[in-house]
Image (cartoon, grey):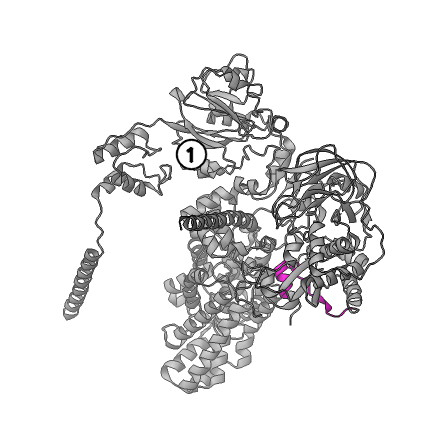
């Protein structure tokens, strides 16, 4: 069996040396924390604290707004000053809770020691409840609430847990460092999830550019039956959920389906670490490890940041914004978006900050498409980016839907590989948004029609 | 001789057979159509802009012929004259519709609304809007990439390089609404043109709170509702921190314009109010000022911002051109 | 400081149109060297005139007719000129070469809107135009003479392909003895258009193109495989020496040049691997049909142009294999 996914992919320069093997350091608490209420996919959380309330670290600030949603806990202790809006990284307003930080007092039930706790007597259902209550979402980037994945819909059963330790995005090293420093905890996290799902098999996918992580995790995994480390050949976007399943267990998730369709559940190593913390130590998700890196950053490295800390303060710890910065990217260079507002608070979504220099920041001028088909062979979903981009520019949404635009995972391989520097993904993303809207509208209309028909009966 | 004869015969016979076949096929697939559809289509302008609400002039002609009255059917391009002609052909009275015009409800000039970032993606409004707030801090204002310019078939809308905003040429605008559809921020309103083009408009679409609006743009409507209180005709409503003037109720008294603290309300094609030191809004003086602005003052443009924009991918392969190319194919 | 805000991705492979064109040009260099060894000054002058006039015409047309910035920096005109020259006999009068370049660039490429828009391979459009307009000049090939003497008066000779054609027509198997040896036709010491004679040099270029990932294997391999199979079957049925028939078919004429460099032209070949294989098989079949039963001894140009016309159809109906298209077995 091959040790990578089968269709497409590209090989960007990984540039991980800047921050690789830098010890995870904690960033000091901010003076004022701003906690956004939307930090996950799904319904926004509903604030349950009021202005003037005193809160402790780990206290629930906002409860989940539905099944596909997650509660938000206070990452700091202090007084709630207001519940208002703040701007996200792209300048758009979002609701948030503002807290003036006073000291660092934690809820008493949270175990803040570093001792490893391996045994767990909880029933599967209890584990899942704890994960849900701790507000854990997928920390790989999509921020999908984790408990939803652990409760397969009726008729579907999970068979394998696929653990994402790939970190295929260039520059980012936070997952790598997490595996090196907290490997034991991750393994316990895996066992907890296996127990919750009632399955025995887990595969940890790690790319071969992290040999020390492969060695370390293999050593730890060998002590446990059913957990296996699979070294994977370098190829972007191996960390994409569907690509990872293909690479690790050789199954392809059908178009439009979730991984559970082929019996797989995917979790990132950072998520598993958070699960360990939540279940064994009662610590909800209030911080994450993020990479701050870039060619001219003074102190690139891996930082543990409490949510609510304005990114500008995190940047200051890493040595401030370098002189020649053109772009600041939230996440990696392949999928992260460049940010407009660096006052945005850190939240569950931000896996890294990448500073691009002026000269790297401006795209080259697009030339004519020479129909070289490089985008077609690079597309990991087997789509035809050149055609989709053209259709999107011509606003031919119907044809785009026929050509499975909704399969696009936004990985950026097409634009990365295009010799004519055509902005393929810009147009495809636009088209995907439009087609998605059309499909949703159609579903709503169908549902409404159905409801009406039933009402008539 | 024989060869010539045979060739002639063979060719002639082939031609004959083909002709008969063609005739039979044409008979078989003949579609009976009301001949008046052609006549109506003849008088329609043929721009196929879709401004009437139908897919094109042909569809509009069919709809006219089918309809029992011409009420509600209007070709915005041809206007009343065309509809009168259509009415003549169909023997129906065409109701006169008031002339309308596109109005861009944003006055966030480069000067009033400082640029805070530079967009490095494909420079079209649709893509910029789907990505983030835009190059300024206003989440509602014009993005300035000219999707509306590309959508206009009549060359009636142009970006003024001085203000960075689109300007509508009243004479060329047919109110077909293509620009309004193209604008991802819904800034363009198809509005009553008014006598001699005189109309009162709130040139702002910002629904954010007053303080936020003011921080982003000097010319924005902050929703203070002063205009509402001075209006004697109940023409002004303020919803979501944004004032709106009902063109049907407005008497052009200009009280609101005088009282507006940010100058968001403008009397278009009207003389300057005395208390106003600033020149008339951009929309009132089209092309001429654009040319002047290009040569004389670059005041509105932050030079750093201009240089960066210049260094970015040019609009050559941009949305407008790509659409045009796709359309021409 | 103003930040630049842009959607992902923020890095690029560094690939460019220019690099790809340059790679093909580099890959053609071994064949060019062999052509110089074989034909001397004729090869050099014809190539130089063809390349220069292609670039000049492209520049003139973009500048004065289309009023755009010229794109000659992307080297596509250089490549067209090079490929056109490689398809011409080296003793062709230079004014004919210039006409060929004008048709290739003017009609074949710029009239459709420039690079990326042309449905047919420009160099082949030029070549076929010349073949039809100047059949005599275009089908008299000099013997390989090297740099000695005046190339214009070089002795002309029948090409292996015309010998083969005679053999097919007459059924006279003794003609096979007059064919060049396998090594001669492989290395390029035979008559023919200037760039097509050395299969060896062209194959070296092919390896370079594959190594730099400029092209994929699909088109050349499917063409050559189809042709080989067809040739073996045809020779076996006609009772001809299979080996001689096969080597002449593969190594003589424009087979290698066409399969590796002309059919793989990005703009005019299909986008999907399956489409490329069908396209290759189509070219292989058409070229063999022309060579075995058609009027011309050579049919590569026509075969490629015909399949160029089919390319949009292949692009429309053949889509790549999508991820997860087949529901995975449980």
Kindly identify the residue that appears in the image at 45 percent across and 53 percent down.
A399
Q: Which residue is mark 1?
A: B155
A375 relative to A287, above or below: below
B2 relative to A126, above or below: below
Measuring from the top left, give residue A74's x and y in whole percent.
Answer: 74, 42
> Is B113 on the left-hand or right-hand side of C317?
right
C278 relative to A393, above or below: below
- C257, C133: nearer the viewer: C257
> Is A254 on the left-hand or right-hand side of A321?
left
Circle 1 chain: B
> Is B200 on the left-hand or right-hand side of A299?
left
Q: Quadrant of residue A356?
A: top right
Specify whether residue C231 is in view.
Answer: yes
Measuring from the top left, give residue C35's x and y in whole percent.
Answer: 55, 68
> Is A38 on the left-hand or right-hand side of A282?
left
Specify whether residue C153 is in view.
Answer: no
Kindly identify the residue that appears in the image at 40 percent across and 32 percent down.
B175
Image quadrant holding the N terminus of chain A, namely bottom right
- A364, B254: nearer the viewer: B254
Measuring from the top left, give residue A32's x and y in whole percent.
Answer: 76, 35
Q: Secondary structure at mark 1?
A: loop
Magenta range is A224-246
- A297, A352: nearer the viewer: A352
Measuring from the top left, give residue A411's x and y in whole percent.
Answer: 61, 54
B327 relative to A92, above or below: below
């Amino acid at each position: 069996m091959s040790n990578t996914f089968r269709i497409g992919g590209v090989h960007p320069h990984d540039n991980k040396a800047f921050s690789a093997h830098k010890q995870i350091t904690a960033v000091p608490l901010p003076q004022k924390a701003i906690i956004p209420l939307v930090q996950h996919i799904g319904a926004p959380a509903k604030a349950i604290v009021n202005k003037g309330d005193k809160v402790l670290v780990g206290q629930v600030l906002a409860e989940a707004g539905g099944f596909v949603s997650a509660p938000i806990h206070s990452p700091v202790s202090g007084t709630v000053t207001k519940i208002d809006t703040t701007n996200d990284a792209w300048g758009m307003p979002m609701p948030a809770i503002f807290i003036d930080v006073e000291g660092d007092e934690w809820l008493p039930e949270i175990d803040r020691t570093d001792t490893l706790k391996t045994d767990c007597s909880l029933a599967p259902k209890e584990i899942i409840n704890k994960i849900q209550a701790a507000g854990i979402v997928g920390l790989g980037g999509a921020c999908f609430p984790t408990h939803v994945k652990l409760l397969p819909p009726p008729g579907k059963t999970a068979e394998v847990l696929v653990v994402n330790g790939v970190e295929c995005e260039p520059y980012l090293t936070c997952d790598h460092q997490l595996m090196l420093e907290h490997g034991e905890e991750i393994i316990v996290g895996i066992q907890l999830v296996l127990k919750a799902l009632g399955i025995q098999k887990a595969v940890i996918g790690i790319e071969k550019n992290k040999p020390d992580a492969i060695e370390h995790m293999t050593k730890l995994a060998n002590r446990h039956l059913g957990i296996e480390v699979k070294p994977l050949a370098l190829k972007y976007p191996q960390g994409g959920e569907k690509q990872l399943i293909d690479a690790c267990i050789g199954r392809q998730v059908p178009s439009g389906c979730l991984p559970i369709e082929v019996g797989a559940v995917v979790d990132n190593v950072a998520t598993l670490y958070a699960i360990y913390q939540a279940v064994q130590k009662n610590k909800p998700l209030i911080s994450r490890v993020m990479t701050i890196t870039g060619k001219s950053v003074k102190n690139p490295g891996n930082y543990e940041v409490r949510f609510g800390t304005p990114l500008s303060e995190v940047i200051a710890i890493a040595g401030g914004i370098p002189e020649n910065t053109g772009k600041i990217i939230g996440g990696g260079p392949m999928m992260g978006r460049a940010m407009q507002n660096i006052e945005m608070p850190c939240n569950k979504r931000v896996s890294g900050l990448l500073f691009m220099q002026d000269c790297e920041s401006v795209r080259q001028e697009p030339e004519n498409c020479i129909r070289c088909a490089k985008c077609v062979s690079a597309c990991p979903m087997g789509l035809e980016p050149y055609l989709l981009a053209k259709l999107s520019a011509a606003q031919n949404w119907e044809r785009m839907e026929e050509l499975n635009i909704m399969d696009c995972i936004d990985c950026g391989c097409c634009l990365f590989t295009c010799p004519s520097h055509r902005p393929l993904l810009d147009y495809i993303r636009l088209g995907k948004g439009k087609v998605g809207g059309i499909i949703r509208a159609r579903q709503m209309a169908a549902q409404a029609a159905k409801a009406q028909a039933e009402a008539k009966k | 001789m024989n060869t010539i004869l045979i060739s002639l015969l063979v060719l002639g016979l082939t031609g004959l057979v083909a002709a008969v076949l063609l005739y039979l096929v044409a008979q078989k697939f003949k579609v009976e159509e009301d001949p008046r559809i052609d006549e109506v289509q003849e008088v329609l302008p043929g721009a196929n802009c879709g401004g009437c609400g139908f897919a094109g002039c042909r569809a509009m002609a069919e709809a006219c012929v089918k309809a029992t009255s011409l009420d509600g059917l209007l070709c915005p391009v041809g206007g009343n004259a065309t509809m009168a002609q259509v009415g003549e052909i169909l023997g129906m009275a065409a109701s006169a519709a008031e002339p309308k015009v596109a109005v861009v409800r944003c006055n966030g000039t480069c000067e009033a609304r400082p640029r805070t970032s530079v967009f490095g993606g494909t420079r079209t409004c649709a893509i910029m809007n789907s990505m983030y707030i835009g190059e300024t801090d206003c989440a509602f204002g014009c993005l300035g990439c000219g999707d509306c310019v590309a959508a206009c078939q009549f060359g009636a809308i142009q970006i003024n390089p001085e203000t960075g905003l689109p300007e509508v040429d009243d004479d060329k605008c047919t109110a077909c609404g293509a620009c309004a559809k193209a604008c991802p921020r819904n800034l363009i309103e198809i509005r009553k043109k008014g006598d001699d083009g005189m109309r009162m408009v709130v040139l702002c679409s910002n629904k954010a709170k007053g303080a936020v609006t003011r921080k982003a743009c000097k010319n924005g409507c902050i929703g203070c509702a002063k205009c509402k209180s001075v209006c004697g005709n109940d023409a002004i409503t303020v919803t979501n921190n944004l004032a709106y003037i009902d063109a049907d109720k407005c008497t052009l008294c200009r009280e609101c314009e005088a009282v507006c603290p940010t100058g968001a309300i403008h009397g278009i094609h009207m003389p300057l109010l005395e208390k106003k030191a600033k020149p008339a809004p951009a929309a009132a003086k089209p092309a001429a000022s654009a040319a002047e602005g290009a040569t004389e003052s670059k005041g509105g443009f932050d030079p750093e911002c201009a240089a960066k924009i210049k260094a970015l991918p040019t609009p050559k392969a941009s949305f407008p051109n790509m659409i045009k190319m796709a359309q021409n194919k | 400081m103003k930040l630049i805000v842009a959607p992902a991705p923020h890095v690029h492979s560094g690939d460019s149109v220019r690099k790809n064109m340059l790679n093909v040009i580099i890959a053609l260099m071994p064949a060019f060297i062999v052509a110089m060894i074989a034909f001397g000054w004729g090869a050099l002058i014809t190539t130089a005139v063809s390349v220069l006039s292609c670039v000049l015409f492209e520049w003139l047309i973009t500048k004065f007719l289309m009023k755009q910035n010229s794109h000659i920096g992307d080297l596509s005109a250089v490549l067209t000129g090079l490929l056109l020259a490689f398809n011409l006999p080296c003793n062709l009068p230079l004014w004919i070469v210039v006409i060929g370049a004008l048709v290739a660039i003017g009609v074949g490429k710029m009239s459709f809107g420039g690079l990326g828009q042309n449905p047919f391979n420009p160099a082949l459009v030029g070549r076929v135009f010349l073949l039809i307009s100047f059949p005599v000049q275009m089908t008299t090939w000099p013997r390989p003479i090297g740099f000695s003497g005046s190339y214009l008066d070089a002795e002309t000779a029948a090409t292996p392909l015309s010998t083969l054609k005679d053999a097919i027509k007459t059924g006279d198997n003794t003609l096979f003895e007059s064919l060049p040896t396998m090594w001669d036709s492989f290395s390029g010491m035979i008559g023919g258009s200037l760039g097509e004679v050395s299969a060896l040099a062209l194959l070296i270029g092919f390896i370079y193109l594959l190594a730099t990932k400029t092209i994929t294997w699909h088109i050349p391999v499917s063409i050559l495989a189809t042709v080989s199979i067809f040739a073996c079957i045809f020779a076996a049925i006609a009772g001809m020496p299979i080996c001689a028939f096969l080597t002449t078919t593969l190594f003589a004429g424009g087979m290698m040049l066409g399969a590796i460099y002309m059919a793989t032209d990005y703009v005019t070949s299909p986008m999907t691997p399956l489409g490329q294989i069908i396209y290759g098989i189509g070219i292989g079949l058409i070229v063999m049909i022309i060579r075995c039963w058609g009027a011309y001894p050579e049919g590569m140009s026509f075969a490629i142009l015909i399949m160029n016309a089919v390319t949009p159809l292949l692009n429309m109906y053949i889509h790549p294999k999508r991820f997860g298209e087949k529901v995975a077995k449980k």
